[in-house]
Amino acid sequence: MNIAEKMSVRDKLNILSDAAKYDVACTSSGTSRSGDGSGMGNCEQSGICHSFSADGRCISLLKVLFTNECVFDCKYCVNRASNDVPRASFTPDEVCTLVMEFYRRNYIEGLFLSSGVMKNPSYTMELIYATLHKLRTECNFQGYIHVKAIPGASQELIAKVGFLADRMSVNLELPTAEGLKLLAPHKTRKSILTPMRLVQNRALENKQEIAVYRNAPRFVPAGQSTQMIIGATPESDYQIMNVAESLYQKFDLKRVFYSAFIHINDDKNLPAKRGEGPPLLREHRLYQADWLLRYYEFEAAELLSEENPNFNVLLDPKCNWALKHLECFPVEVNRADYHTLLRVPGIGYKSASRIVKARRLGTLDFPDLKKMGVVLKRALYFLTCSGKMMYPTRIEEDYITRNLLDVKEKLPGGIAGMSYKQLSLFDDMNFRKEQFIIHEGMKKAPIERMLG
Amino acid sequence: MSRMKKVFICNDNVTSIFSAVYDAWKEERDEGSVGIVLRGNMEQELFCEYIESKEYEKKAIAVERMIQRNLGLDVYLDIYQAVLAHDKDKGNAILGTLLAARQLPDSTKIMNHLSHPSVEKVFELSRRVGGEAHQFKGFLRFRELENGVLFAQIEPKSQVLTCIAGHFSDRLPLENFMIYDRSHKMFVVHEARHQWVLVLDEEADMEKMNRVSASQIEYERLWKGFCESISIKERENLLLQRQNLPLRYRKNVVEFGQ
């Protein structure tokens, strides 16, 4: 503690942003709010990215911990009590000054404030509350604030903080209770789900308050989110998607974030370090499937099953689903309803709604689809325009799979460049070799190329 | 051919393009026999009559009202953004869209008519300009000058200043700030508690603009440090960083400067 007091703001920022970097959600979306002319700041519904760091992730908020002192000892966490790392704590004033000065220079969209657990959860939450209160009332800051609810903090405090923040999140940390018990001994499923439920109920009440009194204060208007670590424990993708689905359905979450496990600590309960880097492709597949749940009316059970519990490495989840359901295709663009269009690989939810609107004014053909943002090289096997397919193709699983594999999937930046050595990772994720679709009679070359 | 095609020549700014739309509209012709080109982008065609369109504020306002009243504010926004785009054929696309709207029973639905080439083009241009404006809402950086004024310089392809001025005025109502569009030599100037104004054909005196306050240097250092420490080494992916933040946007962004 003595060290912390002598430290310059720059050193603190360095330590406490470094310690916060493993938190995933840096989004500033979900709230739309104009400034009231008396202070600083507003919010855009879509959120705004202000920069991108060298790992390609968006920098939207000043993402810092209030303190990295922590009495908890979660095995995977860099700030765990048993780690010997430099510790620091901000004061509420320091956080406020940083936010205001960064914001007016347009570096950031707002603040993401998380914290290690100092003394006890309620004490920490009190400090967070003091910071946000100062920022909102004294500095009159009207930009975006994302805050972490500390599991175990008093309900009253969490509710108070919720009226100052735009989004609140409680980290689920690990997909299953067993994993949590193993790796985060100070947290329990209950201590995590309790604040989550609290935020959900309070937000629901708030909706009614706002319906009656238009100017009632808003409680986490951008909703709540959570994140879980992928690959530290042996859950399958199927289990993870089921957890995500029930979080969306039962807790009204806005987003679930997935964070590829990164080896920071050595611990007998963590997977052995093998030098292959975090499972980014797996994380990417989970995000793709997450979108299918939220925007494309899919259910987890349609994408995966007990027998087939992990995503295909070579194909995105939607293509993979379509190939297993060829009886639903081809779909006639000029007639199929919106829900059916959503299920066609290569058609996004935006282009689907454009199609539905545009065809009221005229018949659509393939070039029109292309201009609306449909990815034809994927969609062409599943579509007809006025009864005609784009090219003569066969509606056969092997044939389409082969062709889809020939078209290189656009993966975010280097995931493709990272080569499929990544695959070795999935070996202990009980990926079966057969799953990499080696059918008889298929052109082997592209698959072999990808498998390296 | 009964009549020669008439093509109106205009400058690349909102007033001038809308003035040309006004002139072309008055001809009461269909899309094939009337057009608009930007000065400097003319490829002379045969059997065309070229006419200089006179730029008048009044004509532009009439066109603006006509679009807002008949096609609605959403369509107006798309057309307005298309006018700002960096594109040499935008005049014809805009005119074509307006003429096509006249054929529809409900003209406000014109932007759904994506199988029409002009509408599709306006849609595309508007999306591009809107996208670029959105990017600059994030990637623009203010520097605090010695006198406390915030100054930002951007180099966009499209004339996005009027698309972002309202955003920053709402966000920073108590600040004096200026945004300079170096590509098109124009400014947005916002005085604390006042409406913003657009200043055309004005170059920035960079010597003045480089005299920043002492705290500016310190906050730049803090910010650069933050951008480095927030990145996860194990996930480093410069290609993805470049996909998300293309090099052309980095010119005036402090964390990418030396």
Image (cartoon, helix red, strand yellow):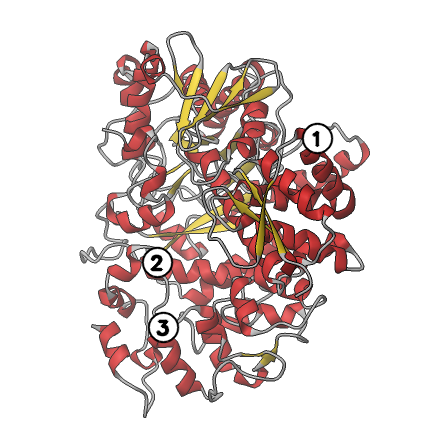
From this viewpoint, which residue is outermost toward the bottom?
Answer: A441
Which residue shows up at 32% across the image and 92% down it? A441
Identify which amino acid the numbered label 3 is placed on.
Val
Local secondary structure at mark 1: helix
Q: Are marks 1 and 2 on the same chain?
A: no
3D distance between C-alphas at marks 3 and 1: 53 Å
- Residues packed near mark 3 inside 10 Å, few (<14), some (14 to 19) or many (20 plus): few
Which residue shows up at 26% across the image and 47% down it? B236
Please give the residue where the numbered disc 3 appears in the rendered image. Answer: A407
Please give the residue where the numbered disc 1 appears in the rendered image. Answer: B58
3D distance between C-alphas at marks 1 and 2: 69 Å
Q: Residue A242, percent across and down?
A: 51, 63
Determine whether label 3 and label 2 are within 8 Å by CB: no
- Label for residue A233? 2
- Viewer can see residue B228: yes
From this viewpoint, which residue is outermost toward the top?
Answer: B147
Q: From the viewer's perspective, is the residue at label 1 or at label 2 nearer?
A: 1
Given residues B208 and A450, the one toward you in this image is B208
Given residues A350 and B1, the one toward you in this image is B1
Q: From the viewer's perspective, is the residue at label 3 or at label 2 nearer?
A: 3
- Residues packed near mark 1 inside 10 Å, few (<14), some (14 to 19) or many (20 plus): few
- Residues packed near mark 2 inside 10 Å, few (<14), some (14 to 19) or many (20 plus): many
Q: Residue A413, percent across and down?
A: 32, 55
**Image-based side of A267 in relation to A111, left or right:** left
Q: From the viewer's perspective, is the residue at label 3 or at label 1 nearer?
A: 1
Given residues A154 and B85, the one toward you in this image is B85
Rendered view: A248 above or below B174: below
Which residue shows up at 35% across the image and 56% down it? A412
Identify which amino acid the numbered label 2 is placed on.
Thr
Local secondary structure at mark 3: loop
Q: Are marks 3 and 2 on the same chain?
A: yes
